Image (cartoon, grey):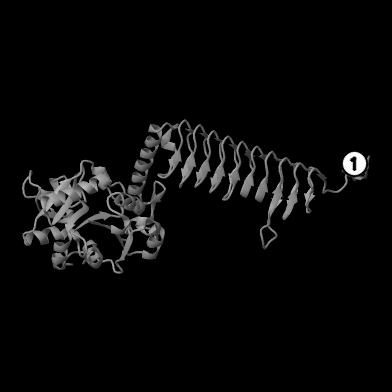
Amino acid sequence: MAIAIMAAGKGTRLKSKHPKVLHEIGGKPILAYVIATASKVVPPPDIFVIIGHEANRVRAALAYTGVNFVLQAEQRGTGHALMVAGEALSPYDQVIVLSGDAPLITPETIQRLSDFHAAQKATMTLLTADLANPFGYGRVLRKSAQSPEVRAIVEQKAATAQQKKIHEINSGFYAFSVPTLYEHIGSLSTDNAHQEYYLTDMAAVFHRARKKVVAIKTSDAGEVLGSNTRAEMMDLDALLRLAKCRQLLSEGVTIFYPQTCVIDSDVEIGTDTVVEPFVQLLGKTKIGSDCRIRSYSVIKNSEIGDNVTINPGTIMDDSRVAASAIIGPYSRLRPGSDIGEGAHVGNFVETKKIKLGKGSKANHLTYLGDAEIGEGVNVGAGTITCNYDGVHKHKTVIEDGAFIGSDSTLVAPVKIGRGSYVAAASCITDDVPADSLALGRARQTVKEGWARERAQKKPTDT
């Protein structure tokens, strides 16, 4: 069995320059969900994604999945998509056709569709659904109410008043007998308003050829819903995110007011962690147990150990925080930040590509970039590692137990030795040996009476 995924369309109703199937819901491209589900039914080499609009972008974005891509250079309808995939699909007995913009389909339903198709010895099997409001969908006309066999699919515009009362709709998911499909697919016509080859017309083609066409109804109509507009995408996004929150709640995570949180599908959270309202956990973020993620924090593609507190307003990208650390409020951890066990990164501290050792602290108003900082280091408020000379980035090394006074400027490349002190407001341009005191500032001068004399020289107002 092979699976073919329709992903060539432009999605004009989105009013977007980007490929429809790369629009994200739940933190991933729509197409990624369909591929992931298909991969639970057949191996990736047996999956064929038919691409067209912005094909190179789609191929690049999903190449990691290991599936095959078939180019539909000219998009002339769903029937045409399977025409161009004929050579790739010809070795198979059965093909399941999925829609690349319907991400809620389940592996169980795909397998059920395949099994039913085989059991019925059918040429074509439709997956159908009952919708309370079927407007806009093609209606399924069965031979009789209890029969699995289908006479035809009639589109909304062509349906009679009586046919429009039918609530069973064609979902756009199919199973085909591959040899018979390609014996008859040439009978499709472009005699329609859009002059395209429609896969739905294969039901009529097979009916005329006296081939068996059947339908099986999904028990959950929601899983076949597509995303043709941005509003529909956001509806699906809400469903996926709420389902993710419910999954995490069932696994022992507390999420206050989950409707306000944005938690992507691949996020992992340990037991007894608390997520406060208005938190965003994005990408492949992984959070340990007994953590507290406080409101308005945005954490992306980061790893957080056990018993960590993330205070409000923290922004974190591609970073790592070890157990028992405290981050924020209003800290920014940029990519490559590695915060050690029990370390503190506090108010308005920005880090980038650094290693902050166990128990070290940078609690206020500091920039630490391209730095290796040892254990037990105290970095005073207002400290800056000057890592960029206008052309190249340079590294600052601060060894264990050092004390960096407030408002210090460390001009990289520079090394502060173990146990050393840097006096407040110093500009350090040379290495500091271990156990030393470094001062790099002008000597203070006090001119007594200067302010009084200045005041006496001021002209008198008239």
Q: Is residue 161 visible?
A: no
Q: Is residue 361 left or right of residue 151?
A: right
**Whether residue 409 is situated above or below residue 71 in the rendered picture:** above
Q: Is 348 in front, or is 372? A: 372
Q: Residue 355 placed where, x, y %?
A: 63, 47
Check disc 1 and report its element: helix, strand or loop: helix
Q: Identify residue type, mark 1.
A: Ala
Q: Which residue is mark 1?
A: 451
Q: Is 135 in front, or is 332? A: 332
Q: Is residue 245 left or right of residue 71?
A: right
**Badge count:** 1
Q: Residue 110 placed where, x, y %?
A: 23, 49
**Quadrant assignment for the C terminus:** top right
Task: Residue at 68% x, 44% y: name it.
Answer: 374
Q: Is 5 in front, or is 461? A: 5
Could you say which quadrant of the image residue 77 lies in? bottom left
**Quadrant assignment for the N terminus:** bottom left
**Whether residue 434 is situated above or below residue 20 in the rendered picture:** above
Q: Is residue 274 visible?
A: yes
**Whether residue 255 is situated above or below residue 55 in the rendered picture:** above
Could you say which quadrant of the image residue 218 lies in? top left
